[in-house]
Amino acid sequence: MQRLWSLLARLNGHTWQDIATAPCNCTIELAVIDGDVTALDCPYCRHDGEWLDATTMTPATVTATHWRRWQPDIIPACCC
């Protein structure tokens, strides 16, 4: 059963990946992992080689080691 959960997590983008593989121009969550996982406080976006705070689109100085897809607290719902 653990293998199934692990596979589903990878398919959904919930696993932490090395920062060198972080995609550009999409909202992601960043973390520092050095034994413990310390997720940074807001979503970020990498654009033209620099990190932006995804909520304000202002440049941010971050030192992260890992990333994963951003999971918003509120999932958008369809009214139809």
Image (tube, rainbow, N blue to C red):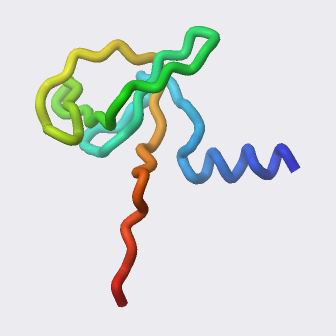
Residue 50 lies in quadrant: top left
Q: Which residue appears at 84% of the width and 44% of the height?
A: 2
User: How many numbered marks have been drawn onto this rendered protein structure?
Assistant: 0
Relative to residue 53, is residue 69 depicted above or below?
below
Relative to residue 71, is residue 66 depicted above or below?
above
The image position of residue 79, as x and y in percent, is 34, 85
Q: Residue furthest top?
A: 34
Q: Which residue appears at 35% of the width and 13% of the height?
A: 63
The image position of residue 8, as x and y in percent, is 68, 53
Q: Is residue 34 left or right of residue 65?
A: right
Q: Quadrant of the C terminus?
A: bottom left
The image position of residue 65, as x and y in percent, is 46, 17
Relative to residue 14, is residue 50 depicted above or below?
above
Q: Is residue 37 left or right of residue 60?
A: right
Residue 57 lies in quadrant: top left
Q: Residue furthest left?
A: 58
Q: Residue furthest bottom?
A: 80
Q: Which residue appears at 14% of the width and 25% of the height?
A: 59
Q: Which residue appears at 65% of the width and 47% of the height?
A: 9
